[in-house]
Every structure is written in structure tokens, then in C-alpha cells.
């Protein structure tokens, strides 16, 4: 999402308003009147990312932080439905007229923060290193002693920021690691394979602008389907033959209330006792 909205850099915030939505309101801080008063007139100086959050930096030190959670989208084009539109930000002096925040399930949030508030909320160890920058040594240090299943541990944003459930499954398949294998039973070579898989999967996902599944919820910034779903090896492929070994069928289990997909041939469990999904 961050790359998709880079075109707003240099634009001036002209208006901020909640969209008319009958759904339960999402968290927007501060209250919309103060949000508008502080943001209108400021210029977008950069668009960054903190984990899975999109951060729109404004001159003067303020930042608008979009936390999409599971179904939120930051868009430059009209959203998939008017019903779930949550916030509209008018723009001037640039090629784009409006920025939208859309959220089907309403789990996300939008915050306008000062530099100090941004540091306090997302610094001081509240988030782990960015997944695209993490090393194998970092993974060992942060997760190597954990008794959690590796699939569950990689979703812990305090340990490593930026890996979601879908990409977690793809990473472990590429690394040939069973998702229920306890972290403390992984060896140095396992961690190196996981680190390389993190880089490959996330880089490819960015290149193909994310994954749009059958429910159509995820869209890129221009409200178009992503393309990475066409390159999935395991996610949402239960019962289909593995595209790598071409012998086993993809299986589905539930870990920490999230669906996990894996290939029993490429990711054998014989070396791992099934870990708790705590």
C-alpha cells in the first residue's frame, strides 16, 4: 500500500472528513474536528511504513498513520463499496484529488500523531525490526528460545514487524519448515532459510502489489486486484497438489485461530513435535 500512494508526496491537505458510514465507527484520533484543524494546509513530505502501517508524513512533524489490520485499504481511487468507506482526505496542488481509507470489517484505525507520539507509540521496542531488514541472527535472538510454533511466532509484531498470516504460510513453505515446529528446535540453517524466504516472499508480494483472494477484499491503491495470489504455493490451496513436489496435497490446520496451509511432503513434521499455538 505504501508504494501505491507515493504519488501524494508534495500535495497539500485540503480537507479531512469522516465518510457517512452506517457501520460501527473506526478509531480516528484525535476527534475529526481537531484532526482537520491540525492537518489542513500541511504538505505531504513523504510516505513511509511501520510494519504493516502506512505513514503519511506532513511538513511540520505531524504524521497520519493508517493501521489497516485485516481489511483496511488506503486508496487513491474510488473504493470497492461506498458502505465501508471510513475517511476522505482532500488533496490540492498535486496530481491526486483525494485519499480514501476503506475498511470492510472496521478493525483498523487512523491517527494523526506528532513526532514524539509516533516514537512513543511505535518505538521503544513495541515493534520488532522490519521484516525486510531482519537478519538470521536477529531471528535467532528474538525467537530462537521460544517454545511457540514458528508459524505463530512469526506473526508476533513485537518480534518482527510486517509479516501477515498469508505470507507467513508462504515463507515457511519456501523455507521447508513445518508450521508447527517449535522455535527452540530450529537450527541455524533453518533460521537462515527462513530469513531468505522472508526476503523473497515479501519482495515478490510488493512487486505483484499484494494478494487479492476470492472474497475480493484486498485491492491496491488504484482499487485493482493484486497479482501475488497467482504465485501462492500453499495459501488457500487446501486439497490441491503442491506445485513444488507435485506429489502431496496441501493441508490446512488452525493455529492461534488463524488458518495455516502447508505441504506435508515439502514441510515434514517428523523432526518436530507439534507445538502449542499459544
Image: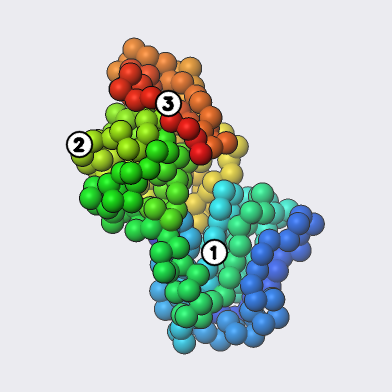
Query: Which residue is painted at 50% across and 70% down in the image?
Result: 121
Image coordinates for residue 33, horizontal then vertical, percent: 70, 80
Marking on residue 274:
3
- The answer to whether residue 55 is above or below residue 206 is below
Q: Mark 3: which secondary structure?
A: loop
Image coordinates for residue 69, horizontal then vertical, percent: 56, 53
Residue 198 visible in this rendered orientation of the protein: no
Image coordinates for residue 6, horizontal then vertical, percent: 42, 66
**Circle 3/circle 1 CB separation < 8 Å:** no
Name the residue at the top extreme: 247
* CA distance for labels 1 and 2: 36 Å
Q: What residue does disc 1 label?
A: 66
Q: Nearer the viewer, mark 1 or mark 2?
A: 2
- The answer to whether residue 21 is above or below residue 276 is below
**Viewer-closest of 56 and 77:** 56
**Viewer-closest of 134 and 42:** 134
Query: Which residue is painted at 46% across and 80% down in the image?
Result: 115
Query: Which residue is painted at 38% across and 53% down in the image?
Result: 160
Q: Is 220 on the left-hand or right-hand side of 106? A: left
Residue 20 visible in this rendered orientation of the protein: yes
Amino acid at each position: 500500500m505504501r508504494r501505491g500512494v507515493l504519488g501524494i508526496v508534495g500535495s497539500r491537505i485540503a480537507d479531512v472528513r469522516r465518510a457517512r458510514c452506517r457501520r460501527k465507527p473506526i478509531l480516528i484520533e484525535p476527534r475529526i474536528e481537531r484532526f482537520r484543524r491540525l492537518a489542513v494546509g500541511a504538505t505531504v513530505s513523504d510516505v513511509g511504513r511501520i510494519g504493516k502501517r502506512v505513514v503519511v508524513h506532513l511538513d511540520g512533524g505531524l504524521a497520519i498513520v493508517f493501521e489497516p489490520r485485516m481489511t483496511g485499504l488506503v486508496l487513491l481511487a474510488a473504493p470497492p463499496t461506498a458502505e465501508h468507506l471510513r475517511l476522505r482526505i482532500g488533496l490540492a496542488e498535486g496530481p491526486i484529488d483525494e485519499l480514501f481509507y476503506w475498511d470492510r470489517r472496521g478493525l483498523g484505525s487512523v491517527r494523526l500523531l506528532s513526532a514524539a507520539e509516533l516514537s512513543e507509540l511505535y518505538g521503544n521496542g513495541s515493534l520488532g525490526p522490519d521484516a525486510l531488514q531482519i537478519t538470521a541472527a536477529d531471528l535467532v535472538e528474538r525467537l530462537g528460545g521460544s517454545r511457540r510454533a514458528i508459524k505463530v511466532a512469526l506473526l508476533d509484531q513485537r518480534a518482527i514487524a510486517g509479516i501477515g498470516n498469508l505470507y507467513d504460510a508462504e515463507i515457511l513453505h519456501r523455507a521447508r519448515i513445518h508450521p508447527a515446529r517449535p522455535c527452540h528446535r530450529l537450527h541455524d540453517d533453518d533460521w537462515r532459510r527462513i530469513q531468505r524466504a522472508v526476503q523473497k516472499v515479501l519482495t515478490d508480494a510488493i512487486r505483484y502489489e499484494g494478494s487479492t483472494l476470492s472474497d475480493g477484499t484486498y485491492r491496491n491503491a488504484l482499487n485493482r486486484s493484486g497479482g501475488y495470489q497467482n504465485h501462492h504455493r500453499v495459501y488457500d490451496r487446501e486439497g490441491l497438489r503442491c506445485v513444488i513436489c507435485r506429489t502431496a496435497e496441501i493441508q490446512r490446520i488452525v493455529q492461534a485461530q488463524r488458518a495455516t496451509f502447508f505441504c506435508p511432503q515439502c514441510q515434514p513434521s517428523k523432526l518436530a513435535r507439534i507445538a502449542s499455538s499459544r
